[in-house]
Amino acid sequence: MKCKICVVGEAWGAEEAKHRTPFIGWMSRMLNPMLDEAGISRADCLLTNVFNLLYNGKTEIFCGPKRTAIPGYGPLTKGYVQEEFQPELDRLRAEITETQPNIIIAMGNAALWAFSGHAAISKYRGATFLSTHTVPGVKVLPTYHPAAVMHQYELRPTVVFDLMKAAREAEYPEVRRPKADIYIPETIEDLHDFQAKFIRDFLSIDIETSGNHITCIGFAPSSEVGLVIPFVGSRANRNYWNSATDERHAWGFVRGLVEAKDIEKLFQNGLYDVSFLWRAYGIMAANCGEDTMLLHHALQPEALKGLGYLGSIYTDHGPWKHLHARGSTIKRDN
């Protein structure tokens, strides 16, 4: 039977082992309401585990030294999964190959490990990726296991958010990333060219700081394009700009945008950004509209509110807070 969604857990608890069925008993009482809230019908999903074996909630029982581990996979919590459990991965591969889901919801560290080769659920949850292990090429969205929700109930809204994203992602098998062009200026002329081309009556603003200084500031007139203005660079004097004159002009450009009364501003944790701009640089932000952190807090007071978390919830970008590879820059004449 083919299905769009496959839900993969870790292993059987006592009741699940007795009936040889995943996510039943108290586990179903945790999972089923979250699926319902996300608009996912359990009956339409394949539900399975990485290990169809009884465990005590600790995946260490499947682990041991690296020399006797399944090759090609990293450690799972405390140790490496041993070769004797390779048949479990073979069975999981066969189940997924038969049902051909558009997306796998990987619940917990063991499920994330099975499809990525590493276990860091809190770091990668909420971001889709293509599996590199067990069943390469299948779209995966990791989230917390229902057992984790039972022990840390504050995780529940996050899992519901992730399941809602999975419901959207289940409509197609490929990973789709939003278009986002980031401009990094090389000259002062680049700044004014960007303003003339893109900036009208709205800007999202975010600053990065180190000590008492702003290292860079970003402006985005839409979700598809943004401008990042660096002030700290790799030169011996740590300046990004070629001369003090250019740096003054860059700050004048920043001041003009931030203080413009005809441009509505959107911030993330804007109380920090606005006060920092004023205290450190004497720049008074004008026409400040909404704050994404506060808007999210109004919706989910118990959830996290950092930018990386909000990105994982409300966008389809990858986990950019953990990506450090440099992409290509967009030149002024492009």
Image (cartoon, rainbow, N blue to C red):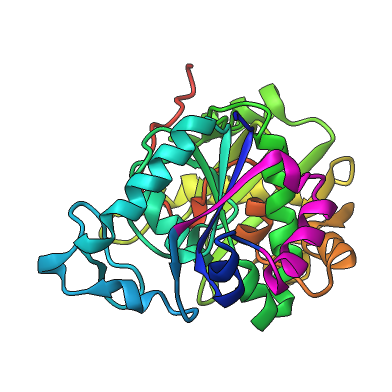
- Residue 127 visible: yes
Queried whether the magenta region covers residue 48, the answer comes back as yes
Q: Residue 142: percent from the left, percent from the top?
A: 54, 54
Q: Residue at x 34, y 78 (%)?
A: 61
How far from the left and from the top, in percent, is residue 135?
38, 39
Vertical relation: 105 (above or below) 300: above
Residue 228 lies left or right of residue 199; in this view the side is: left
Quarter of the image where one finds residue 233: bottom left
Q: Which of 53 and 235 is in front in this view?
A: 53
Q: Is residue 221 visible?
A: no
Q: Nearer the viewer, residue 266 or 194?
A: 266
* Left-right relation of 261 to 278: right
Q: Does the magenta stretch include residue 216?
A: no
Instruction: Give the residue at the far front of this rendering.
Output: 18
Task: Answer with left or right where residue 57 lies relative to residue 313.
Answer: left
**153 above or below 205?**
below
What's drawn in magenta, residue-wise?
A: 24-50
Screen quadrant of the N terminus? top right
Considering every residue shown, the one lying at the far top of the view is: 334
